[in-house]
Amino acid sequence: MRDIFDAELAQLGHDLVAMSGRVERAITDAGVALLTADVTLAESVIAADVEIDAIERDLDERCVLLLAQQQPVATDLRIVVSALRMSATLERMGDLARHIAQVARGRYPRQAIPHGLSGTFTEMHDAAVRVARRTTTLLTNHELPLAESIEQDDDLLDELHEDTFAALLSGGWDGSIQEAVDVTLLGRYYERFGDHGVSIARRVTYLVTGVLSQELDRSAS
């Protein structure tokens, strides 16, 4: 019986890794679509989000069954509850990638990003892709230095987000109202993506060390 339970716990981990891999692909493709006005790529991200949602629903159902049938305690309980939390966080990250792709699609054939901010959003894209890639690796091997790297990229995303506001509020802004709205929304999407990555990093740290961070679920707010 214990062997079956252990196998089910292991499968939860495998599914989280698979889900994170799809999120990684989504944010990568969404950013490329945004920066290059690739409407086909944007539409593929939007369509693929249903697959991320489906993995979350299946994973959550199995977590609930494990809680009801096995009544896990101590470390086992921590694993199941953390899987529930992380699947929800990954689903939100997938949604944010979809939102970015929807902006890219909505402005086609034009690029949504004004030329003067293309460098800032290229940096945001690169940082978000690193967050996603490191999240997938962290879920695979639980190497805690990766958690710190995710937090560093999140700090960079926060700084870049502030740069977008500085550009919008500067006297030199000459973009349209629609461009201002797009920049505001896109900056927020990338900033939140980083926050969710940090939430997962801290959750994995909790799983490994048993130490509960006071800011464990800051992205849930």
Image (spheres, rainbow, N blue to C red):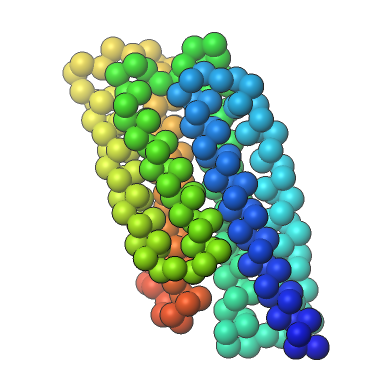
Q: Quadrant of residue 173?
A: top left
Q: Quadrant of residue 35?
A: top left
In the drawing, does residue 178 fall left or right of residue 96?
left
Query: What residue is drawn where x is 50% and y is 76%?
Result: 207
In the drawing, does residue 201 fall left or right of residue 19?
left
In the drawing, does residue 145 fall left or right of residue 167?
right
Query: What residue is drawn where x is 46% and y is 43%?
Result: 129
Residue 201 on image: x %, y %: 45, 63
Query: What residue is drawn where x is 38% and y is 13%?
Result: 176
Question: Along the line of sight, which residue is nearer the eye, 131 or 212?
Answer: 131
Residue 116 on image: x %, y %: 29, 19
In the drawing, does residue 47 fall left or right of residue 103?
right
193 in relation to 149, above or below = above
| Viewer can see residue 197 | no
Residue 42 on image: x %, y %: 60, 27
Question: Along the line of sight, which residue is nearer the eye, 176 or 145?
Answer: 145
- Outermost residue, left direction? 171
**Screen quadrant of the N terminus:** bottom right
Question: Along the line of sight, which residue is nearer the eye, 5 or 187?
Answer: 5
Query: What residue is drawn where x is 46% and y is 46%?
Result: 193
Residue 59 on image: x %, y %: 71, 62
All told, the count of numbered labels is 0
| Viewer can see residue 47 | yes
